[in-house]
Amino acid sequence: MTSRSDKTGAAWREHTHLVLDGRARPVEASLYGRAIAARSAGRPLSLVPVHELSHVTVIGQVRLDAPMLAACAAAGRPVGITDSDGRLRALVVPTGVRRTPLGEALDRLARRSDWTDRLDDWRRSRISRIARGITPDPAAAARAGWAGAQALIVAAAGAGTRATAARLANIARTEACIIAAAALTEAGCPARWMRRAADPGRDLVPLFGQIALWRLARLTLRSRAAARLRAALRDDLERSGRPGARLARTAARVTAPLHRALLREADALHRWCLDMTGPAASWRLEDGAPL
């Protein structure tokens, strides 16, 4: 088991994305000093420093110890836990309460009685902007949300069976959400705005996940590396009959540009929040309290 070049290993790393793959054989991941140690029977130990990671994806039978999860959360490295069909079952987001400009702007926005509707308007406007040039009706794309982007990615990959297409769509959505959580953390989004259990309305991960998925669809169709990405997806499907380890590595190639794009989206959200809560905004607070 290696972290980089062994394509049959139980863990690999491309750029700053760590995949813990326990489908072929169980994997145990624990904290070793300031690194994640991944062990699997018959494979050498893999050590990956936590600070080098952007996020972690867990697939199959992987045992995670509490100190390792706590270290990732404290360092702002999201951990996504998926099922065998690629669906995201759990997401460990960064912990702690920080005072950041973005967090304070979001808290001020939440004082508006209509803030959830306005935030959804912003989401649709951003998706519509991203969808220009890859769909005939960007406004309809924004309304379609997840499904529209997933359909484009599946079509570009040439997925054969319905089961294969569904799993590919699940994997794309899962990676989009995990990368979204990583970008939001780096942009200064506090944990209280990424926790669905506490308040579903204040969980920005699904919102940014949709934006990330549309960005991924655009990369698949219109980027300089689009042809290579589509070819890799098709090759993986032809070889295995379903997306597998090679697809995860292929998807990792777009992590860096996708992460940068989401940082720009977070900056746009911050500026929009300031506009919506500034002295020129045409609204008043429910309780009449001044800003």
Image: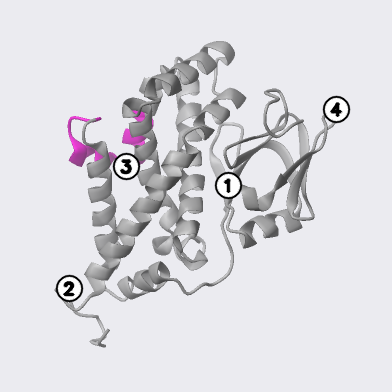
What residue did someone put label 1 on? 55
Q: Mark 3 or mark 1: which comes first in sequence?
A: 1
Q: Are marks 2 and 1 in contact (CB under 8 Å)?
A: no
In the image, what residue type sits under mark 1? Answer: His
In the image, what residue type sits under mark 4? Answer: Gly
> How far apart, in angstroms, are the residues tagged by discs 3 and 4?
43 Å
> How far apart, in angstroms, are the residues tagged by discs 1 and 4?
26 Å
User: Magenta stretch?
Assistant: 134-152
What residue did someone put label 2 on? 281
Q: Mark 3 or mark 4: which comes first in sequence?
A: 4
Q: Nearer the viewer, residue 83 or 245?
A: 245
Mark 4: give few (<14), some (14-19) or many (20+) Cα within 10 Å: few
Q: Mark 4 or mark 2: which comes first in sequence?
A: 4
User: Would residue 142 be visible to someone looking at this image?
Assistant: no
The quadrant in which the C terminus is found is: bottom left
Percent position (x, y) of residue 237?
51, 16
Taking the magenta stretch, the answer to whether it contains residue 142 is yes
